[in-house]
Amino acid sequence: MTEGSPPADLAIETDGLSKRFGHRTVVDGVDLAVPRGSVFGFLGPNGSGKTTTIRLLLGLASASSGHIRVLGGEMPSQLATVLPRVGPLVEGPAFYPFLSGAANLRRLDSADLHASPRTRAARVDEALERVGLSHAAAKKVRAYSLGMKQRLGIAHALLRPRELLVLDEPTNGLDPQGTREVRGLVRSLAAGGTTVFVSSHLLAEVEQMCTHVGVMSVGKLVAQGTLHELRAAGKATVRLHTPDIEAAVRVLTRLGLQSELSPPQPGSYASDGRSLVTTGPAGHDVAPEAIVAALVSNGVRVRGFWVENASLEERFVSLTGEGFDIAG
Amino acid sequence: MTGAPDARPSSSWSLMASELSVLFRRLRTWAMLLALAAIPLLIAAAVKLSSHPVAPGRGPPFLDRITQNGLFVAVTAMTVSVPLFLPLTVGVVAGDTVAGEANLGTLRYLLVAPAGRVRLLLIKYVSAAAFCLAATLTVAAAGALAGVALFPVGPVTLLSGDTVGVGESLVRSLLIAAYIAVSLLGLSAIGLAISTFTDVPVGAMAATVVLSVVSQVADNLPQLEWLHPWLFSHYWLGFADLLRQPVSWTSFGNNALLQAAYIVAAGALAYGRFTSKDVLS
Protein backbone atom coordinates (compact mmCIF):
# COMPACT_ATOMS: atom_id res chain seq x y z
CA MET A 1 0.00 0.00 0.00
CA THR A 2 3.01 2.22 0.01
CA GLU A 3 2.71 5.24 -2.19
CA GLY A 4 5.06 5.15 -5.12
CA SER A 5 6.61 8.53 -4.43
CA PRO A 6 10.23 9.24 -5.31
CA PRO A 7 12.58 9.04 -2.30
CA ALA A 8 13.34 12.76 -2.41
CA ASP A 9 9.79 13.48 -1.28
CA LEU A 10 10.08 11.47 1.87
CA ALA A 11 10.62 13.17 5.22
CA ILE A 12 11.30 9.85 6.93
CA GLU A 13 12.42 6.72 5.20
CA THR A 14 13.55 3.51 6.82
CA ASP A 15 14.71 0.37 5.18
CA GLY A 16 14.60 -2.92 7.05
CA LEU A 17 14.90 -1.09 10.36
CA SER A 18 15.31 -3.52 13.25
CA LYS A 19 16.18 -3.23 16.90
CA ARG A 20 16.93 -6.13 19.17
CA PHE A 21 17.45 -6.06 22.91
CA GLY A 22 19.16 -9.34 23.62
CA HIS A 23 16.92 -11.98 22.09
CA ARG A 24 13.89 -9.73 22.00
CA THR A 25 13.18 -8.07 18.67
CA VAL A 26 11.33 -4.86 19.46
CA VAL A 27 11.39 -3.36 15.98
CA ASP A 28 11.38 -5.88 13.18
CA GLY A 29 12.16 -4.96 9.57
CA VAL A 30 10.22 -1.69 9.46
CA ASP A 31 10.10 0.11 6.07
CA LEU A 32 8.59 3.47 6.83
CA ALA A 33 7.85 5.99 4.07
CA VAL A 34 6.59 9.29 5.41
CA PRO A 35 5.91 11.75 2.57
CA ARG A 36 6.91 15.38 3.07
CA GLY A 37 3.97 17.56 4.00
CA SER A 38 1.92 14.68 5.34
CA VAL A 39 0.47 14.24 8.79
CA PHE A 40 1.51 10.68 9.39
CA GLY A 41 -0.27 8.76 12.13
CA PHE A 42 1.96 6.10 13.62
CA LEU A 43 -0.56 3.79 15.13
CA GLY A 44 -0.20 0.72 17.27
CA PRO A 45 -1.13 -0.73 20.62
CA ASN A 46 1.05 -0.07 23.65
CA GLY A 47 4.27 -2.05 23.40
CA SER A 48 4.15 -2.47 19.64
CA GLY A 49 7.52 -0.74 19.13
CA LYS A 50 6.40 2.79 18.25
CA THR A 51 8.50 4.63 20.78
CA THR A 52 11.57 2.49 20.10
CA THR A 53 11.19 3.25 16.39
CA ILE A 54 11.05 6.97 17.23
CA ARG A 55 14.18 6.66 19.36
CA LEU A 56 15.94 5.03 16.43
CA LEU A 57 14.75 7.78 14.06
CA LEU A 58 16.16 10.45 16.36
CA GLY A 59 19.48 8.74 16.98
CA LEU A 60 18.84 8.10 20.66
CA ALA A 61 19.33 4.39 20.15
CA SER A 62 21.28 2.64 17.45
CA ALA A 63 19.59 0.25 15.07
CA SER A 64 20.57 -3.41 15.07
CA SER A 65 20.16 -3.39 11.31
CA GLY A 66 18.60 -1.33 8.55
CA HIS A 67 18.94 2.22 7.29
CA ILE A 68 17.27 5.47 8.30
CA ARG A 69 16.98 8.70 6.35
CA VAL A 70 15.38 11.71 7.99
CA LEU A 71 14.88 14.90 5.94
CA GLY A 72 17.25 13.52 3.37
CA GLY A 73 20.07 12.91 5.83
CA GLU A 74 21.43 9.55 6.89
CA MET A 75 20.82 8.86 10.58
CA PRO A 76 22.61 8.75 12.89
CA SER A 77 25.71 9.81 10.94
CA GLN A 78 24.21 13.16 9.84
CA LEU A 79 22.48 13.74 13.15
CA ALA A 80 24.09 17.14 13.72
CA THR A 81 22.56 18.65 10.59
CA VAL A 82 19.27 16.74 10.66
CA LEU A 83 18.08 17.11 14.24
CA PRO A 84 18.02 20.94 14.41
CA ARG A 85 15.27 20.75 11.77
CA VAL A 86 13.22 18.26 13.80
CA GLY A 87 10.90 19.22 16.64
CA PRO A 88 10.75 16.33 19.09
CA LEU A 89 8.32 15.06 21.69
CA VAL A 90 9.64 11.66 22.68
CA GLU A 91 7.85 9.40 25.14
CA GLY A 92 6.21 12.23 26.98
CA PRO A 93 7.59 15.55 28.11
CA ALA A 94 10.56 15.69 30.50
CA PHE A 95 11.65 18.78 32.37
CA TYR A 96 13.65 20.00 35.34
CA PRO A 97 11.04 20.25 38.10
CA PHE A 98 13.02 22.92 39.95
CA LEU A 99 13.07 25.29 36.95
CA SER A 100 10.20 27.37 35.61
CA GLY A 101 8.52 26.47 32.34
CA ALA A 102 10.28 29.28 30.49
CA ALA A 103 13.65 28.45 32.08
CA ASN A 104 13.23 24.83 31.01
CA LEU A 105 12.66 25.84 27.41
CA ARG A 106 15.65 28.20 27.46
CA ARG A 107 17.78 25.42 28.90
CA LEU A 108 16.80 22.87 26.24
CA ASP A 109 17.12 25.47 23.49
CA SER A 110 20.66 26.28 24.59
CA ALA A 111 21.62 22.67 23.86
CA ASP A 112 20.98 23.33 20.16
CA LEU A 113 24.13 24.79 18.64
CA HIS A 114 22.12 26.37 15.82
CA ALA A 115 19.59 28.14 18.03
CA SER A 116 20.40 31.80 18.28
CA PRO A 117 20.73 33.01 21.88
CA ARG A 118 19.68 36.50 20.78
CA THR A 119 16.18 35.42 19.82
CA ARG A 120 15.89 32.78 22.54
CA ALA A 121 13.73 34.70 25.00
CA ALA A 122 11.38 35.85 22.24
CA ARG A 123 11.08 32.38 20.77
CA VAL A 124 10.36 30.90 24.20
CA ASP A 125 7.61 33.45 24.82
CA GLU A 126 6.10 32.79 21.43
CA ALA A 127 6.11 29.01 21.87
CA LEU A 128 4.51 29.32 25.31
CA GLU A 129 1.90 31.63 23.88
CA ARG A 130 1.15 29.17 21.12
CA VAL A 131 0.28 26.36 23.54
CA GLY A 132 -1.53 28.67 25.95
CA LEU A 133 1.00 28.53 28.76
CA SER A 134 2.06 32.18 28.95
CA HIS A 135 0.37 32.60 32.32
CA ALA A 136 2.42 29.73 33.79
CA ALA A 137 5.76 30.66 32.22
CA ALA A 138 7.33 31.69 35.54
CA LYS A 139 5.85 28.82 37.51
CA LYS A 140 8.10 25.94 38.49
CA VAL A 141 7.40 22.83 36.41
CA ARG A 142 7.06 20.90 39.68
CA ALA A 143 3.69 22.65 40.08
CA TYR A 144 2.52 21.87 36.52
CA SER A 145 -0.27 19.39 35.88
CA LEU A 146 0.29 16.52 33.45
CA GLY A 147 -1.59 18.40 30.76
CA MET A 148 0.51 21.52 31.29
CA LYS A 149 3.70 19.49 31.02
CA GLN A 150 2.39 18.00 27.81
CA ARG A 151 1.74 21.48 26.44
CA LEU A 152 5.20 22.58 27.51
CA GLY A 153 6.61 19.56 25.68
CA ILE A 154 4.81 20.65 22.53
CA ALA A 155 6.02 24.22 23.05
CA HIS A 156 9.56 22.86 23.17
CA ALA A 157 9.06 21.14 19.82
CA LEU A 158 7.89 24.48 18.39
CA LEU A 159 10.80 26.57 19.68
CA ARG A 160 12.19 26.90 16.19
CA PRO A 161 10.65 26.61 12.73
CA ARG A 162 10.84 22.91 11.96
CA GLU A 163 10.58 20.87 8.81
CA LEU A 164 9.49 17.82 10.72
CA LEU A 165 7.72 17.34 14.02
CA VAL A 166 7.96 13.97 15.71
CA LEU A 167 5.25 13.86 18.33
CA ASP A 168 5.00 10.75 20.46
CA GLU A 169 1.53 10.53 21.99
CA PRO A 170 1.04 14.32 22.01
CA THR A 171 -2.43 14.32 23.53
CA ASN A 172 -1.55 12.04 26.39
CA GLY A 173 -2.85 13.50 29.63
CA LEU A 174 -4.74 16.32 27.94
CA ASP A 175 -8.40 17.00 28.59
CA PRO A 176 -10.81 17.02 25.61
CA GLN A 177 -10.31 20.75 25.19
CA GLY A 178 -6.53 20.35 25.13
CA THR A 179 -6.81 17.44 22.71
CA ARG A 180 -8.82 19.63 20.34
CA GLU A 181 -6.24 22.37 20.62
CA VAL A 182 -3.43 19.98 19.79
CA ARG A 183 -5.33 18.71 16.78
CA GLY A 184 -5.86 22.27 15.64
CA LEU A 185 -2.20 23.04 16.19
CA VAL A 186 -1.09 20.01 14.20
CA ARG A 187 -3.42 20.98 11.35
CA SER A 188 -2.15 24.55 11.26
CA LEU A 189 1.47 23.40 11.31
CA ALA A 190 0.77 20.93 8.52
CA ALA A 191 -0.93 23.70 6.56
CA GLY A 192 2.30 25.66 6.90
CA GLY A 193 4.18 22.83 5.22
CA THR A 194 5.60 21.04 8.25
CA THR A 195 5.59 17.27 8.09
CA VAL A 196 4.10 15.85 11.27
CA PHE A 197 4.87 12.33 12.40
CA VAL A 198 2.51 11.61 15.27
CA SER A 199 2.35 8.37 17.18
CA SER A 200 -0.73 7.28 19.00
CA HIS A 201 -2.54 4.27 20.31
CA LEU A 202 -5.82 6.15 19.88
CA LEU A 203 -7.39 5.45 16.55
CA ALA A 204 -9.94 8.24 16.70
CA GLU A 205 -7.17 10.77 17.19
CA VAL A 206 -5.25 9.56 14.16
CA GLU A 207 -8.41 9.41 12.08
CA GLN A 208 -9.18 13.03 12.89
CA MET A 209 -5.87 14.65 12.09
CA CYS A 210 -3.81 12.44 9.82
CA THR A 211 -3.49 12.13 6.08
CA HIS A 212 -1.35 9.01 6.23
CA VAL A 213 -1.22 6.07 8.58
CA GLY A 214 1.27 3.39 9.48
CA VAL A 215 0.16 0.57 11.74
CA MET A 216 2.59 -1.21 14.03
CA SER A 217 1.95 -4.57 15.59
CA VAL A 218 4.47 -6.56 17.62
CA GLY A 219 7.40 -4.65 16.17
CA LYS A 220 6.31 -4.94 12.55
CA LEU A 221 4.80 -2.31 10.28
CA VAL A 222 1.70 -4.21 9.16
CA ALA A 223 0.10 -1.50 7.03
CA GLN A 224 1.05 1.87 5.62
CA GLY A 225 -0.56 4.34 3.26
CA THR A 226 -3.01 7.18 3.06
CA LEU A 227 -5.96 7.11 5.38
CA HIS A 228 -8.14 6.57 2.33
CA GLU A 229 -6.11 3.61 1.10
CA LEU A 230 -6.22 1.97 4.48
CA ARG A 231 -9.96 2.43 4.71
CA ALA A 232 -10.53 1.14 1.18
CA ALA A 233 -8.66 -2.03 1.98
CA GLY A 234 -11.55 -2.99 4.18
CA LYS A 235 -14.93 -3.90 2.70
CA ALA A 236 -17.57 -1.25 2.43
CA THR A 237 -21.05 -1.97 3.65
CA VAL A 238 -24.32 -0.96 2.08
CA ARG A 239 -27.28 -0.30 4.32
CA LEU A 240 -30.72 -0.27 2.82
CA HIS A 241 -33.95 0.80 4.41
CA THR A 242 -37.05 -0.64 2.80
CA PRO A 243 -40.43 -2.23 3.53
CA ASP A 244 -39.94 -4.73 0.64
CA ILE A 245 -37.42 -7.04 2.23
CA GLU A 246 -37.95 -10.16 0.17
CA ALA A 247 -37.77 -8.37 -3.18
CA ALA A 248 -34.70 -6.48 -2.09
CA VAL A 249 -32.88 -9.65 -1.04
CA ARG A 250 -33.61 -11.21 -4.46
CA VAL A 251 -32.18 -8.19 -6.29
CA LEU A 252 -29.12 -7.99 -4.11
CA THR A 253 -28.40 -11.71 -4.41
CA ARG A 254 -28.60 -11.38 -8.19
CA LEU A 255 -25.96 -8.63 -7.95
CA GLY A 256 -23.72 -10.96 -5.97
CA LEU A 257 -24.19 -9.26 -2.62
CA GLN A 258 -24.86 -11.05 0.61
CA SER A 259 -27.52 -9.55 2.76
CA GLU A 260 -28.85 -9.95 6.22
CA LEU A 261 -31.65 -8.39 8.16
CA SER A 262 -30.47 -5.98 10.78
CA PRO A 263 -32.38 -4.82 13.83
CA PRO A 264 -34.11 -1.45 13.36
CA GLN A 265 -31.61 1.37 13.65
CA PRO A 266 -32.10 3.82 16.46
CA GLY A 267 -33.64 6.94 14.99
CA SER A 268 -35.21 5.17 12.03
CA TYR A 269 -37.97 7.36 10.75
CA ALA A 270 -40.29 4.77 9.22
CA SER A 271 -42.05 2.47 11.60
CA ASP A 272 -42.98 -0.09 8.99
CA GLY A 273 -39.66 -0.14 7.17
CA ARG A 274 -36.91 -2.53 8.10
CA SER A 275 -33.22 -2.33 7.51
CA LEU A 276 -31.23 -4.67 5.41
CA VAL A 277 -27.47 -4.78 5.59
CA THR A 278 -25.34 -6.11 2.84
CA THR A 279 -21.64 -6.51 2.62
CA GLY A 280 -19.97 -5.33 -0.50
CA PRO A 281 -20.05 -4.11 -3.14
CA ALA A 282 -17.67 -7.03 -3.36
CA GLY A 283 -14.52 -6.15 -5.25
CA HIS A 284 -15.87 -2.69 -6.05
CA ASP A 285 -17.41 -4.07 -9.25
CA VAL A 286 -20.93 -2.91 -8.42
CA ALA A 287 -21.37 0.81 -8.08
CA PRO A 288 -23.76 2.02 -5.38
CA GLU A 289 -25.87 3.88 -7.94
CA ALA A 290 -26.23 0.63 -9.94
CA ILE A 291 -27.56 -1.10 -6.85
CA VAL A 292 -30.16 1.61 -6.31
CA ALA A 293 -31.16 1.53 -9.97
CA ALA A 294 -31.61 -2.24 -9.88
CA LEU A 295 -33.64 -2.04 -6.69
CA VAL A 296 -35.94 0.67 -7.96
CA SER A 297 -36.49 -0.97 -11.37
CA ASN A 298 -37.54 -4.14 -9.56
CA GLY A 299 -40.14 -2.28 -7.58
CA VAL A 300 -38.28 -2.12 -4.28
CA ARG A 301 -39.23 1.02 -2.37
CA VAL A 302 -36.00 2.52 -1.22
CA ARG A 303 -36.48 4.64 1.85
CA GLY A 304 -32.86 5.01 2.72
CA PHE A 305 -29.56 3.95 1.27
CA TRP A 306 -26.11 4.38 2.79
CA VAL A 307 -22.65 3.27 1.76
CA GLU A 308 -20.53 2.86 4.85
CA ASN A 309 -16.80 2.49 4.55
CA ALA A 310 -15.28 -0.10 6.79
CA SER A 311 -14.43 1.72 9.96
CA LEU A 312 -10.74 2.19 10.48
CA GLU A 313 -11.27 0.68 13.86
CA GLU A 314 -12.27 -2.69 12.40
CA ARG A 315 -9.27 -2.52 10.12
CA PHE A 316 -7.00 -1.61 13.00
CA VAL A 317 -8.27 -4.43 15.17
CA SER A 318 -7.93 -6.91 12.33
CA LEU A 319 -4.32 -5.82 11.89
CA THR A 320 -3.23 -5.64 15.49
CA GLY A 321 -5.49 -8.07 17.28
CA GLU A 322 -8.03 -7.33 19.92
CA GLY A 323 -7.93 -7.15 23.66
CA PHE A 324 -5.79 -5.67 26.35
CA ASP A 325 -2.83 -7.99 25.96
CA ILE A 326 0.26 -5.91 25.59
CA ALA A 327 2.35 -7.23 22.78
CA GLY A 328 5.82 -8.45 23.51
CA MET B 1 8.62 27.57 6.71
CA THR B 2 12.33 27.12 6.58
CA GLY B 3 13.86 24.96 9.22
CA ALA B 4 17.40 25.38 8.05
CA PRO B 5 19.93 26.10 10.76
CA ASP B 6 20.29 29.78 11.46
CA ALA B 7 23.06 31.55 9.64
CA ARG B 8 24.49 32.70 12.96
CA PRO B 9 25.13 29.65 15.07
CA SER B 10 25.04 30.17 18.78
CA SER B 11 28.27 29.77 20.65
CA SER B 12 29.03 26.60 22.48
CA TRP B 13 29.11 28.61 25.70
CA SER B 14 25.36 28.83 25.73
CA LEU B 15 24.93 25.29 26.99
CA MET B 16 27.90 25.61 29.34
CA ALA B 17 26.37 28.71 30.92
CA SER B 18 23.02 26.97 31.12
CA GLU B 19 24.61 23.93 32.74
CA LEU B 20 26.33 26.03 35.40
CA SER B 21 23.20 28.01 36.07
CA VAL B 22 21.14 24.82 36.48
CA LEU B 23 23.76 23.46 38.86
CA PHE B 24 24.11 26.56 40.97
CA ARG B 25 20.45 27.53 40.97
CA ARG B 26 19.54 24.18 42.38
CA LEU B 27 18.51 24.06 46.02
CA ARG B 28 20.46 20.85 46.56
CA THR B 29 23.72 22.51 45.49
CA TRP B 30 23.14 25.37 47.91
CA ALA B 31 22.29 22.97 50.72
CA MET B 32 25.57 21.13 50.17
CA LEU B 33 27.60 24.34 50.03
CA LEU B 34 25.92 25.59 53.20
CA ALA B 35 26.69 22.29 54.94
CA LEU B 36 30.32 22.64 53.87
CA ALA B 37 30.39 26.23 55.13
CA ALA B 38 29.07 25.00 58.46
CA ILE B 39 32.19 22.87 59.05
CA PRO B 40 34.63 25.76 59.70
CA LEU B 41 31.93 27.59 61.65
CA LEU B 42 31.45 24.54 63.85
CA ILE B 43 35.19 24.15 64.40
CA ALA B 44 35.65 27.85 65.20
CA ALA B 45 32.68 27.91 67.57
CA ALA B 46 33.79 24.73 69.33
CA VAL B 47 37.31 26.05 69.89
CA LYS B 48 36.03 29.46 70.97
CA LEU B 49 33.51 28.07 73.46
CA SER B 50 35.75 25.39 74.89
CA SER B 51 37.29 26.24 78.24
CA HIS B 52 40.19 23.82 77.80
CA PRO B 53 43.01 24.91 75.57
CA VAL B 54 43.61 22.46 72.74
CA ALA B 55 46.72 20.41 73.39
CA PRO B 56 49.15 20.35 70.46
CA GLY B 57 48.93 17.08 68.52
CA ARG B 58 45.37 16.35 69.61
CA GLY B 59 42.47 16.58 67.19
CA PRO B 60 42.79 17.62 63.55
CA PRO B 61 46.04 19.23 62.35
CA PHE B 62 46.47 22.94 63.16
CA LEU B 63 43.53 22.85 65.61
CA ASP B 64 45.76 23.97 68.49
CA ARG B 65 46.91 27.03 66.57
CA ILE B 66 43.46 28.46 66.02
CA THR B 67 43.25 30.32 69.32
CA GLN B 68 46.48 32.16 68.54
CA ASN B 69 45.67 32.85 64.91
CA GLY B 70 42.22 32.74 63.29
CA LEU B 71 43.74 32.14 59.86
CA PHE B 72 44.18 28.49 60.82
CA VAL B 73 40.43 27.89 60.94
CA ALA B 74 40.30 27.61 57.15
CA VAL B 75 43.24 25.21 56.95
CA THR B 76 41.86 23.05 59.75
CA ALA B 77 38.39 22.96 58.17
CA MET B 78 39.80 22.00 54.78
CA THR B 79 41.85 19.22 56.34
CA VAL B 80 38.78 17.92 58.14
CA SER B 81 36.61 18.06 55.00
CA VAL B 82 38.96 16.24 52.65
CA PRO B 83 38.39 12.63 53.71
CA LEU B 84 34.59 12.59 53.71
CA PHE B 85 32.60 15.81 53.35
CA LEU B 86 34.12 17.05 50.14
CA PRO B 87 34.10 13.62 48.40
CA LEU B 88 30.50 13.22 49.53
CA THR B 89 29.32 16.44 47.89
CA VAL B 90 31.51 15.92 44.83
CA GLY B 91 30.13 12.38 44.53
CA VAL B 92 26.58 13.74 44.58
CA VAL B 93 27.29 16.26 41.82
CA ALA B 94 29.46 14.00 39.64
CA GLY B 95 27.20 10.98 40.05
CA ASP B 96 24.20 13.07 39.06
CA THR B 97 25.71 14.49 35.84
CA VAL B 98 24.38 12.02 33.28
CA ALA B 99 22.25 9.71 35.41
CA GLY B 100 20.31 12.68 36.80
CA GLU B 101 19.39 13.88 33.30
CA ALA B 102 18.50 10.31 32.32
CA ASN B 103 16.32 10.00 35.40
CA LEU B 104 14.45 13.23 34.61
CA GLY B 105 14.17 12.23 30.95
CA THR B 106 15.82 15.48 29.92
CA LEU B 107 18.81 13.56 28.58
CA ARG B 108 16.85 12.52 25.50
CA TYR B 109 15.80 16.10 24.84
CA LEU B 110 19.36 17.40 25.23
CA LEU B 111 20.59 14.73 22.82
CA VAL B 112 17.96 15.34 20.14
CA ALA B 113 18.50 19.12 20.39
CA PRO B 114 21.21 17.97 19.39
CA ALA B 115 23.70 18.77 22.13
CA GLY B 116 26.23 16.26 20.81
CA ARG B 117 27.21 13.42 23.08
CA VAL B 118 30.88 14.32 23.40
CA ARG B 119 30.09 17.99 23.92
CA LEU B 120 27.52 17.18 26.57
CA LEU B 121 29.97 14.91 28.37
CA LEU B 122 32.64 17.62 28.35
CA ILE B 123 30.23 20.24 29.61
CA LYS B 124 29.04 17.91 32.35
CA TYR B 125 32.61 17.33 33.43
CA VAL B 126 33.50 21.01 33.45
CA SER B 127 30.47 21.77 35.60
CA ALA B 128 31.43 19.00 38.04
CA ALA B 129 34.94 20.44 38.17
CA ALA B 130 33.48 23.90 38.80
CA PHE B 131 31.62 22.44 41.75
CA CYS B 132 34.88 20.97 43.15
CA LEU B 133 36.35 24.47 43.12
CA ALA B 134 33.20 26.08 44.54
CA ALA B 135 32.99 23.52 47.34
CA THR B 136 36.62 23.93 48.39
CA LEU B 137 36.48 27.71 48.17
CA THR B 138 33.33 27.69 50.29
CA VAL B 139 35.15 25.89 53.09
CA ALA B 140 38.15 28.18 52.76
CA ALA B 141 36.09 31.37 52.66
CA ALA B 142 33.80 30.40 55.53
CA GLY B 143 36.89 29.39 57.51
CA ALA B 144 38.64 32.69 56.85
CA LEU B 145 35.55 34.68 57.84
CA ALA B 146 34.95 32.66 61.01
CA GLY B 147 38.63 32.91 61.96
CA VAL B 148 38.78 36.68 61.44
CA ALA B 149 35.53 37.15 63.35
CA LEU B 150 36.32 35.02 66.39
CA PHE B 151 40.08 34.99 66.86
CA PRO B 152 43.08 37.31 66.69
CA VAL B 153 44.71 37.43 63.29
CA GLY B 154 48.39 37.97 62.73
CA PRO B 155 51.52 36.77 60.98
CA VAL B 156 51.57 33.00 60.50
CA THR B 157 54.46 30.73 61.34
CA LEU B 158 54.86 28.18 58.55
CA LEU B 159 55.88 24.54 58.94
CA SER B 160 59.37 25.50 57.89
CA GLY B 161 59.59 27.97 60.77
CA ASP B 162 59.41 31.09 58.59
CA THR B 163 56.83 33.72 59.33
CA VAL B 164 54.62 35.26 56.66
CA GLY B 165 52.16 38.13 56.83
CA VAL B 166 48.38 37.96 56.75
CA GLY B 167 48.14 38.62 53.01
CA GLU B 168 50.68 35.93 52.15
CA SER B 169 48.97 33.45 54.47
CA LEU B 170 45.64 34.07 52.74
CA VAL B 171 47.35 33.29 49.44
CA ARG B 172 48.64 30.07 51.00
CA SER B 173 45.06 29.20 52.05
CA LEU B 174 43.91 29.72 48.50
CA LEU B 175 46.75 27.53 47.26
CA ILE B 176 45.59 24.76 49.57
CA ALA B 177 42.03 25.22 48.31
CA ALA B 178 43.32 24.92 44.75
CA TYR B 179 45.29 21.82 45.70
CA ILE B 180 42.20 20.18 47.17
CA ALA B 181 40.02 21.18 44.23
CA VAL B 182 42.55 19.54 41.90
CA SER B 183 42.58 16.49 44.19
CA LEU B 184 38.88 16.03 43.62
CA LEU B 185 39.05 16.16 39.81
CA GLY B 186 39.90 12.46 39.49
CA LEU B 187 36.98 11.52 41.69
CA SER B 188 34.71 13.76 39.59
CA ALA B 189 35.79 11.96 36.43
CA ILE B 190 35.12 8.61 38.08
CA GLY B 191 31.67 9.85 39.15
CA LEU B 192 30.94 11.01 35.60
CA ALA B 193 31.97 7.63 34.18
CA ILE B 194 29.79 5.75 36.67
CA SER B 195 26.96 8.15 35.88
CA THR B 196 26.94 7.06 32.23
CA PHE B 197 26.22 3.47 33.24
CA THR B 198 22.95 3.99 35.08
CA ASP B 199 19.68 5.90 35.01
CA VAL B 200 19.55 5.95 38.81
CA PRO B 201 21.45 8.99 40.05
CA VAL B 202 21.48 7.88 43.69
CA GLY B 203 23.24 4.69 42.66
CA ALA B 204 25.95 6.58 40.79
CA MET B 205 26.38 9.01 43.71
CA ALA B 206 26.68 6.20 46.27
CA ALA B 207 29.12 4.24 44.11
CA THR B 208 31.32 7.31 43.67
CA VAL B 209 31.39 8.07 47.39
CA VAL B 210 32.04 4.42 48.25
CA LEU B 211 34.98 4.36 45.82
CA SER B 212 36.48 7.40 47.52
CA VAL B 213 36.24 5.65 50.88
CA VAL B 214 37.66 2.39 49.49
CA SER B 215 40.58 4.29 47.98
CA GLN B 216 41.37 5.94 51.32
CA VAL B 217 41.07 2.67 53.24
CA ALA B 218 43.37 0.94 50.77
CA ASP B 219 45.80 3.82 51.15
CA ASN B 220 45.99 3.06 54.86
CA LEU B 221 46.72 -0.67 54.50
CA PRO B 222 50.48 -1.26 54.56
CA GLN B 223 49.92 -4.58 52.78
CA LEU B 224 48.84 -2.65 49.71
CA GLU B 225 51.83 -0.33 49.69
CA TRP B 226 52.61 -1.08 46.02
CA LEU B 227 49.18 0.24 45.16
CA HIS B 228 49.33 3.46 47.17
CA PRO B 229 50.91 5.78 44.58
CA TRP B 230 48.17 4.78 42.14
CA LEU B 231 45.22 5.54 44.39
CA PHE B 232 43.44 8.76 43.45
CA SER B 233 43.20 9.73 47.11
CA HIS B 234 46.92 9.16 47.75
CA TYR B 235 47.91 12.82 47.74
CA TRP B 236 44.66 14.20 49.14
CA LEU B 237 46.24 15.36 52.41
CA GLY B 238 49.65 16.12 50.95
CA PHE B 239 49.29 19.88 50.87
CA ALA B 240 51.65 20.50 53.83
CA ASP B 241 54.35 21.38 51.29
CA LEU B 242 52.38 24.50 50.47
CA LEU B 243 52.97 25.67 54.05
CA ARG B 244 56.73 25.79 53.70
CA GLN B 245 59.04 28.59 52.63
CA PRO B 246 59.82 28.40 49.77
CA VAL B 247 56.77 26.53 48.51
CA SER B 248 57.60 23.01 47.42
CA TRP B 249 55.56 22.19 44.33
CA THR B 250 56.52 18.52 44.12
CA SER B 251 53.42 17.14 45.79
CA PHE B 252 51.20 19.58 43.87
CA GLY B 253 52.73 18.35 40.62
CA ASN B 254 52.50 14.67 41.56
CA ASN B 255 48.90 15.13 42.61
CA ALA B 256 47.98 17.00 39.44
CA LEU B 257 49.64 14.31 37.31
CA LEU B 258 47.81 11.50 39.12
CA GLN B 259 44.47 13.30 38.82
CA ALA B 260 45.10 13.92 35.12
CA ALA B 261 45.73 10.20 34.63
CA TYR B 262 42.40 9.41 36.32
CA ILE B 263 40.64 12.03 34.21
CA VAL B 264 42.02 10.43 31.04
CA ALA B 265 41.17 6.87 32.12
CA ALA B 266 37.71 7.60 33.53
CA GLY B 267 37.05 10.05 30.69
CA ALA B 268 37.85 7.36 28.13
CA LEU B 269 35.48 4.98 29.88
CA ALA B 270 32.73 7.60 30.02
CA TYR B 271 33.31 8.45 26.35
CA GLY B 272 33.22 4.81 25.27
CA ARG B 273 30.06 4.17 27.19
CA PHE B 274 28.15 7.37 26.50
CA THR B 275 28.81 7.65 22.78
CA SER B 276 27.55 4.11 22.16
CA LYS B 277 24.76 4.09 24.71
CA ASP B 278 21.13 3.53 23.77
CA VAL B 279 19.26 6.27 25.58
CA LEU B 280 16.03 4.58 26.58
CA SER B 281 15.22 6.65 29.64
Image: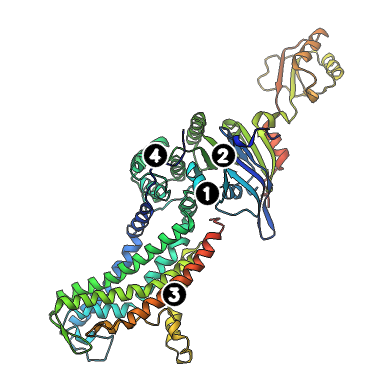
Q: Which residue is mark 4?
A: A128
Residue at the image point whose x is 40% and y is 45% from the top: A115
Earlier in the chain: of badge 4 and badge 1, it is 1
Q: Nearer the viewer, mark 2 or mark 1?
A: 1
Q: Residues within 10 Å of mark 2 (few under 14, many from 20)?
A: many
Q: Quadrant of residue A10?
A: top right
Q: Do badges 3 and 4 share one subunit?
A: no
Q: Which mark is residue B261?
A: 3
The residue marked by circle 2 belongs to what chain? A
Tell me, yes or no, whether the two marked residues, 3 and 2, touch with CB atoms within 8 Å: no
Q: Residues within 10 Å of mark 1 (few under 14, many from 20)?
A: many
Query: Which quarter of the figure is the N terminus of chain A placed in?
Result: top right
Please state which amino acid type lies under the numbered disc 3. Answer: Ala
Tell me the residue at 45%/37% (across/down). Answer: A161
Judging depth in this view, the residue of B86 and A80 nearest the camera is: A80
Please name the residue that numbered disc 1 is placed on. A79
User: Which class describes the residues within 10 Å of circle 4: few (<14), some (14-19), or many (20+)?
Assistant: many
Spatial separation of the CA atoms under disc 3 and disc 1: 32 Å
Residue at 51% x, 28% y is A191
Q: Amino acid at mark 1?
A: Leu
Residue type at mark 2: give it: Val
Residue lying furthest front = B7
